[in-house]
Image: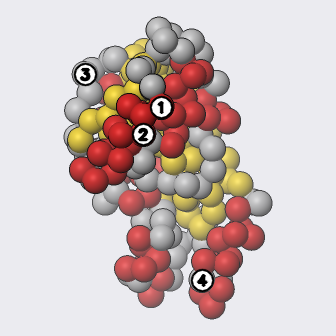
């Protein structure tokens, strides 16, 4: 992941939490005790193998308030206005249709619901050779959107109180991913917060 979405989520007992691109369920399992037995955590992932792994872990460790659903983050298998908080950890940058992801997030959030996302963002336009490098794309680099573009997408989807905070401390570990490309000059990890009015 790119960080800890829980740190900005301020989860409360009884809330319904949705994790976009839940993978093996790590962030879901961290959220489960915070929302408690009256709360619910839903993980959505498009990979059946990861869902199987997450479901096995949930069953083995008695996470009764966590469920995992097969689906894409651009077409969420979740009811309208049913979620209090959406978490996501280094996943949205991989989507070729980020506008749709934010529209879907807005649809499933209750009024007053909030986004608590950690992801890679672009602080300067990527040179073409980096943007089209498939190894960097899969490594959360090539798909990172510019901060101004993300703010625009979130506004267009209907969100308010949008805060995107780059984490300068992430530059050090990003540099290690591909030292010859100086990718830390173009992308950093950031927290992305917004509220559905």
Q: Quadrant of residue 106?
A: top left
Give the residue pinned by disc 3: 79
Residue at figure coordinates x 35%, y 47% from the top left:
53
Q: Which mark is residue 178?
A: 4
Task: Work out whether mark 2 precedes mark 3 in sequence or the reverse, and give the earlier one.
Answer: 2
Task: Work out whether mark 4 precedes mark 3 in sequence or the reverse, and give the earlier one.
Answer: 3
Task: Work out whether mark 1 precedes mark 3 in sequence or the reverse, and give the earlier one.
Answer: 1
Q: Which mark is residue 57?
A: 2
Distance between the alpha carbons at the discs numbered 4 and 3 = 41 Å
Q: Nearer the viewer, residue 103 or 59?
A: 59
Q: Is residue 27 above or below residue 132?
A: above
| Label 1: which secondary element | helix
| Label 3: which secondary element | loop
Task: Work out whether mark 2 precedes mark 4 in sequence or the reverse, and give the earlier one.
Answer: 2
**Contact, CB < 8 Å: mark 2 with mark 1?**
yes
Residue at figure coordinates x 59%, y 16% from the top left:
12
Q: Position of residue 29 (x, y in %)?
A: 51, 34
Give the residue pinned by disc 1: 61
Q: Quadrant of the N terminus?
A: bottom right
Horizontal side of residue 88 vs 174, given as left or right: left
| Label 4: which secondary element | loop
Q: Position of residue 182 (x, y in %)?
A: 65, 83
Q: Is residue 26 above or below residue 85?
A: below
Residue at figure coordinates x 42%, y 80% from the top left:
135
Mark 1, Cα crowd under 10 Å, few <14 / some 14-19 / many 20+, is few
């Amino acid at each position: 992941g790119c960080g800890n979405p829980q740190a900005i989520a301020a989860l409360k007992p009884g809330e319904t939490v949705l994790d976009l691109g839940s993978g093996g369920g790590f962030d879901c399992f961290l959220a489960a005790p915070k929302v408690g037995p009256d709360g619910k955590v839903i993980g959505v992932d498009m990979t059946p193998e990861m869902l199987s792994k997450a479901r096995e872990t949930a069953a083995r460790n008695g996470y009764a308030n966590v469920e995992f659903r097969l689906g894409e983050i651009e077409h969420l298998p979740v009811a309208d206005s049913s979620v209090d908080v959406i978490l996501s950890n280094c996943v949205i940058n991989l989507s070729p249709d980020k506008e749709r992801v934010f529209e879907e997030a807005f649809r499933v959030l209750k009024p007053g619901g909030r986004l608590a996302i950690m992801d890679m963002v672009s602080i300067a336009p990527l040179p073409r050779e980096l943007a089209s490098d498939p190894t960097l794309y899969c490594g959360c680099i090539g798909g990172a959107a510019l901060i101004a573009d993300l703010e625009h997408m979130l506004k267009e989807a209907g969100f308010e109180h949008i805060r995107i905070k780059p984490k300068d401390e992430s530059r050090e570990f990003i540099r290690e991913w591909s030292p010859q490309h100086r990718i830390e000059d173009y992308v950093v990890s950031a927290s992305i917060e917004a509220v559905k009015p």
